């Protein structure tokens, strides 16, 4: 971790000017780091806000973002070391105290902290996560949830955040309507307290000419030994249980039994689940059709080689890979448990959204139908263009504009 110049750090409790500038924005995140979902989104937003002329104050316990850019100030929030629950509780308590001392701040909390103007519910609702874990995790998961104080701490903090939202007319930022539905399932929060802003996705990484995409496709498929008559399905993600890789493997087996020539590429690694899913592919008789790629730094060749993204995740508040795949021109087949379904549903050419509780047969039918539609398209270039258009709401420029409009609304 690189050191931040001492004169750029503001210690907790230090004097801060009471006159809040019109373009001052405060972001609250436990750790400022280029890794992790909420952390990455906070870092991206901070960089784009500064580029738009805002001054960003970061309330965080740890800085791991390299040299502090001009236009940013770091306020170090104390966090107790120890178990996860202690870190979460102590940071929330200290950050909330800081916000209370400076009520003029326009703050966006990316971590679970009460008292911010906006709470970005990146993980939506912990109560919903616990409910699904109880359904799918067995007795070991139930025991862990019962004895681990972290879950009680998170539920308590979330309760405070959502109560403050109603009492103080705050706003909750969700990445998709799914997040709002999950929260309202457990907390009586009016619709007008929610704002839907999708995550920022750096789509510029996938801006290539048609000739470059074709070259990448041939090169990657040749390296993997994929025949031209084989349909390549792509599964992306490292949490094999929550992304239900076992169901994906069952779908491949079902398609194979129907006579469909299909290959599966799995981009991601799950240390605990890897060997179990390798054995499952063998048991299903599809081991030769499945390639475990492990962690992949550059996904562009995978998207180029694939014909379809298949992701039957049990629960994802969004699913950035869906936006990436669509921007690369791929149709997708995903579950109703993914927030990115909002990108897919408006246009049939984007793919299919399948009920989260559907079995392999229904999933296989959706995949076969989508592949068939793509194969017999009368204008494949236009279809691919429509899929790219569906991903554009996640462009950083568009997402930034939504945040700036929201901040201006509060300023007014």
Image (cartoon, helix red, strand yellow):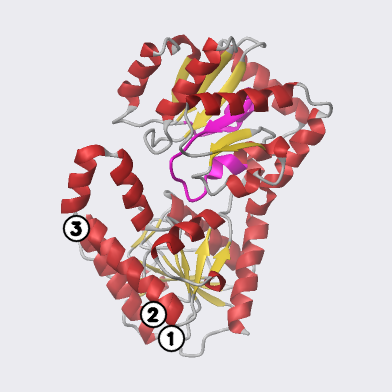
Task: Indicate left or right for 60 with 400 as reference.
Answer: left
Indicate the quadrant where residue 152 lies: bottom left
SS for dot 2 = helix
From the viewer's side, name the closer residue of 308 and 216.
308
When the figure is inspected, residue 153 is found, relative to residue 405, above or below; the finding is: above
SS for dot 3 = helix
Q: CA distance from mark 1 to mark 3?
A: 31 Å
Tag 1 residue: 103
> Residue 151 at what x, y percent from top left?
25, 57
Indicate the quadrant where residue 123 lies: bottom left
Q: Is residue 263 magenta?
A: no
Count of numbered badges drawn on the protein: 3
Of callouts 1 and 3, which one flags the residue occurring earlier in the amino acid sequence? 1
Of callouts 2 and 3, which one flags the residue occurring earlier in the amino acid sequence? 2
Indicate the quadrant where residue 154 lies: bottom left
Residue at 65 percent of width and 39 percent of height: 326
Quarter of the image for the C terminus: give it.
Answer: bottom right
Q: Is residue 302 magenta?
A: yes
Task: Indicate left or right for 54 with 8 as reference.
Answer: right
SS for dot 1 = loop
Does residue 102 appear in the picture of this structure? yes
**Mark 2 neighbour density, 10 Å: few (under 14) some (14–19) many (20 or more):** many
Is label 2 in contact with label 1 (beta carbons under 8 Å)?
A: yes
Tag 2 residue: 99
> Residue 236 at what x, y percent from top left?
49, 33
> Residue 401 at what x, y percent from top left?
66, 65
Q: What are the residue bounds of the magenta stretch?
A: 296-323
Going by the picture, which residue comes out furthest to the right? 378
Q: CA distance from mark 2 to mark 3?
A: 26 Å
Q: CA distance from mark 2 to mark 1?
A: 6 Å
Determine which of the numbered discs, if any, sits on residue 149 in the image: 3
Is label 2 in contact with label 3 (beta carbons under 8 Å)?
A: no
């Amino acid at each position: 971790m690189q050191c931040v110049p001492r004169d750029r750090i503001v210690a907790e409790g230090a004097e801060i000017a009471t006159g809040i500038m019109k373009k001052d924005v405060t972001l609250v995140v436990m750790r400022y780091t280029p890794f992790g979902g909420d952390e990455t989104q906070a870092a991206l937003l901070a960089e784009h806000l500064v580029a738009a002329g805002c001054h960003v104050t970061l309330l965080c316990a740890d800085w791991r973002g390299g040299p502090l850019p001009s236009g940013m100030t770091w306020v170090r929030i104390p966090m107790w070391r120890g178990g996860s629950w202690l870190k979460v509780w102590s940071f929330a308590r200290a950050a909330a105290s800081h916000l209370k001392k400076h009520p003029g701040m326009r703050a966006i909390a990316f971590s679970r902290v009460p008292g911010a103007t906006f709470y970005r519910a990146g993980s939506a609702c912990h109560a919903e996560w616990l409910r699904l874990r109880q359904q799918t995790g067995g007795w070991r998961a139930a025991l862990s949830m019962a004895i681990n104080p972290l879950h009680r701490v998170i539920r308590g903090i979330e309760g405070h955040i959502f109560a403050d939202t109603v009492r103080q007319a705050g706003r909750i930022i969700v990445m998709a309507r799914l997040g709002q539905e999950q929260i309202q399932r457990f907390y009586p929060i009016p619709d007008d307290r929610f704002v839907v802003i999708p995550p920022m996705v750096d789509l510029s990484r996938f801006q290539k000419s048609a000739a470059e995409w074709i070259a990448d496709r041939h090169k990657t498929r040749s390296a993997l030994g994929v025949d031209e008559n084989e349909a390549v399905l792509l599964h992306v993600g490292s949490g094999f249980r929550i992304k239900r890789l076992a169901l994906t493997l069952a779908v491949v087996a079902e398609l194979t039994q129907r006579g469909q020539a299909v290959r599966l590429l799995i981009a991601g690694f799950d240390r605990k689940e890897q060997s179990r899913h390798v054995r499952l592919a063998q048991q299903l008789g599809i081991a030769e059709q499945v390639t475990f790629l492990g962690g992949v730094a550059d996904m562009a060749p995978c998207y180029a080689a694939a014909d379809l993204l298949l992701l039957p995740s049990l629960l994802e508040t969004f699913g950035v890979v869906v936006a990436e795949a669509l921007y690369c021109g791929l149709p997708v087949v995903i579950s109703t448990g993914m927030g990115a379904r909002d990108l897919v549903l408006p246009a049939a050419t984007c793919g299919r959204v399948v009920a989260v509780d559907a079995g392999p047969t229904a999933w296989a039918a959706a995949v076969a139908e989508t592949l068939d539609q793509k194969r017999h398209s009368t204008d494949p270039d236009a279809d691919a263009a429509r899929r790219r258009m569906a991903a554009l709401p996640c462009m950083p420029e568009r997402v930034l504009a939504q945040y700036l409009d929201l901040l201006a609304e509060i300023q007014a």
